[in-house]
Amino acid sequence: MARLLRTGSILALICALILGGCGSTPLPLTSPASASPAVVGSASAPSGSSTPTAAATASPAPSLDRVAGWRADIDGLLTARETVHPDPWLGISRADWVAAADAVKARIPELTDDQALVELVRLAAMPGWKGRDGHTGIFLTPGSGIHPYPVRLWRFSDGLVITAVRAPYEDLVGSRITAIGGHPIDEVLRLVEPLSPRDNPTTLLAFAPRYAGVSELLAGLGVIDRAGPATFSLVGRDGKTRDVAIEPITVEEDVAWNSGQPTRLPPTDAPWLRDQAKPLWWTYLDDSRTLFVQYNSVERGLNPIVDEILARAKQDDVARVIVDLRHNGGGDNTTIGHFEDILGDPAINRPGRLVVLIGRITFSAAANFATDLEQSTAVTFAGEPMGGSPNQYGDPREVSLPYGGQSVYVATRYWQRGAADDQRTTIVPEIPADLSSDDYFSGRDPVLQAVFDTPVAPG
């Protein structure tokens, strides 16, 4: 069974599939909406080899034995890639991918199921390793039988830190992970990164920790002996070290616990973290004469708020307009035109006056939005490089594989928001700023502070 997902909220979709959801709710399963300034690549024809059509099967095929089943799943990746993706071999030659796939198929009899799963996920991500294809891969959906650990993680400037946990592990919040199963955490992250889709290296900051938190993948990579409890080596905020065995849960339990937000920073009382559930809101910061706008989800129905923003920006006490995209994983990119027009108004669009905050979660339609502003306004970017690419492949179609319970998501459309010859895979901010775990738990916003420390241009 194949399902086509409307453009835009792809980090929302992708994170919903990476163990439970992120950014916003999954999109309706419809044909792609026609959208604004985008270039759609033509579908590449399959290269002539005969491959099984079982990639459209919704449930495991009972007639397949284990070896034939895993091989059918690998063949299903090839079928899906060549029949769905507009540029299936954008980052690797077909011959190289087929050779890698054939090598895995030859090893299936000697691999465990967890090892075979790792190889399947790796093969799904492989054509996108060079970037711009962060919507394509295996995201380990509910029903896939995998078991994540009930921890929410963020890669801060000082390491990989637990930002939220499910009971009974509440006392682990704030702990920095130094190892899993005795393997240094940097080694674990290097092992999982080839499994993760990405538009660019910043995408991996958001996605790779989710793959590092899946029991079956850690077992298949040799980080732990078998799927099940894993020992996490931790350093608490008090500097004390300890080893804690954490039991995994089902992916369905993880979805319910995470409430669809596993890759965002959990909300706190800090102003920039508190209202992530609101798609768009604004406030005036007297001390800095700043109109602060947070845009968390690209969706319909926001134009009245957008109009309020322009009206407030025209008042004499506003020296700067800041638009925060750091929690925005995307949405419907057919809805962004009015907001872009407002930010292009002379009341806002002046050098140094319009600042946009970006980061690893700024992806898909949010990356479209940022790129459009780069092309049409005098915007200054602050934060970290965004997780989405200026030009990117999106609108993924779900294709169920025939044996192991997995689905592969394959981009169906090319979105060109930058120049046709733009080879960048991200936008790098003019005002860079890192976030430490101490910043987060203390409620500080170093990105906003870095903007405040940058003088506003006269006029």
Image: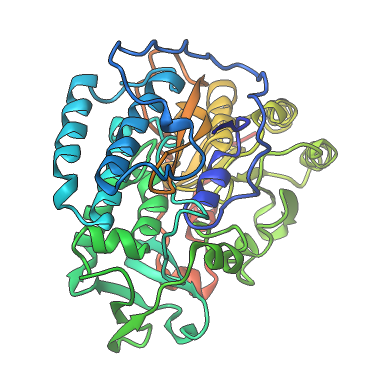
| Nearer to us in this view, 447 or 93 | 93
| Nearer to us in this view, 114 or 148 | 114
Q: Is residue 382 above or below residue 433?
A: above
Q: Residue at x 18, y 75 (%)?
A: 182
Exactly how many numbered labels are in the figure?
A: 0
Scheme of colours in the image: rainbow
Horizontal side of 147 relative to 328 (left or right) equals left
Q: Is residue 138 above or below residue 86?
A: below
Is residue 162 visible from the viewing direction of this image?
A: yes
Is residue 451 visible from the viewing direction of this image?
A: no
Q: Residue at x 38, y 20 (%)?
A: 82
| Nearer to us in this view, 282 or 163 | 163
Q: Position of residue 72 (x, y in %)?
A: 32, 36
Q: Is residue 255 above or below residue 457?
A: below
Q: Position of residue 69 (x, y in %)?
A: 32, 42
Q: Quadrant of residue 275?
A: bottom right
Q: Quadrant of residue 186?
A: bottom left
Q: Position of residue 421 (x, y in %)?
A: 38, 13
Q: Position of residue 71 (x, y in %)?
A: 27, 38
Q: Quadrant of the C terminus?
A: top right
Q: Residue at x 24, y 20 (%)?
A: 94
Q: Is residue 189 above or below residue 414?
A: below
Q: Quadrant of residue 123?
A: top left
Q: Quadrant of the N terminus?
A: top right
| Nearer to us in this view, 246 or 277 | 246
